[in-house]
Image (cartoon, rainbow, N blue to C red):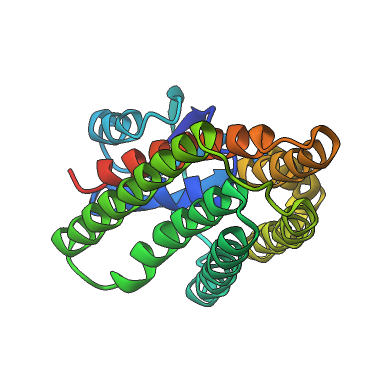
Amino acid sequence: MNKTIFEITKMDCPSEENLIRMKLDGISSIANLDFDIPNRKLTVFHIGETDQIEKSVLELNLGGKKISTEQTDQTEFNENANQKKLLWSVLAINFAFFIIEMTTGIISKSMGLVADSLDMLADSFVYGISLFAVGGTVIKKKRIAKLAGYFQITLAIIGFVEVLRRFFGDEKLPNFSTMIIVSIFALIANGICLYILQKSKSKEEAHMKASMIFTSNDVIINLGVITAGLLVNWLSSSKPDLIIGTIVFVLVIQGAFRILKLSK
């Protein structure tokens, strides 16, 4: 048995972990994957060479880089029997907030909330692809990933068009209080998701949970929408909302391309 350690610089939260798991699924030489999200490290226990594994990691464009490979006597690994249940929990939370943020975003005329809802939907896709394709073929997973990726890109493009329309048009100011309140609840939801997923880790990693929460892209986006809401009220301008919406739409499209890489 060999143990290869990778540094994954863009692995900020469990959704990236799940992307990597799906990408490496089907490589028969892999015995176990051990993720250290706070330190952005992935340890792969495998038999034989690392070429195929390294190629797959690099194809995700998450800043993957092989650090070392060495032999190990470890052949037994702790399997998490509750992993599927945990994934269902975070899928439900993310999809629920996609509905909430999309609805309140349309009602309050906030592109920041609409964009953040698509980011929640993106995470739902990542967890959903893994769950709905459990036990299925690799081809089935790739088809689902392709549909999810293109659907996500389509929604983001529609969002960009709406941002441009509002930027050059005479649109009413978004409701800043709705932006702030909903984003605070979304912030709490993202923290809960990260906590739930980390229940599957060892107790020794408990002290790393806070670090994970505050380095998560999802949390940063929530804080961005809250800040935009405050600026909308302060400046009496919709521009901060449109700017944060544009930034998040870009992140959503980047996430969509990562999902599409799983379909290749």
The percent coordinates of residue 147 (x first, y second) are 23, 57
Can residue 47 be seen by looking at this rendering? yes
Residue lying furthest left in this view? 139
Q: Is residue 57 above or below residue 221?
A: above
Q: Is residue 94 above or below residue 25?
A: below
The percent coordinates of residue 35 (x first, y second) are 54, 46
Front residue of 146 and 81? 146
Residue lying furthest right in this view? 234
Front residue of 260 and 73? 260
Front residue of 223 and 159? 159
- Where is residue 159, by image quadrant? top left
Can residue 72 be seen by looking at this rendering? no
- Where is residue 78, by image quadrant? bottom right
The residue shown at (46%, 62%) is 124
In the visual, does 182 lie left or right of 147?
right
Q: Is residue 173 above or below residue 120?
A: above
The percent coordinates of residue 67 (x first, y second) are 48, 22
In which quadrant will I find the N terminus?
A: top left
In the visual, does 174 lie left or right of 27?
right
In which quadrant will I find the C terminus?
A: top left
In the visual, does 211 lie left or right of 109?
right
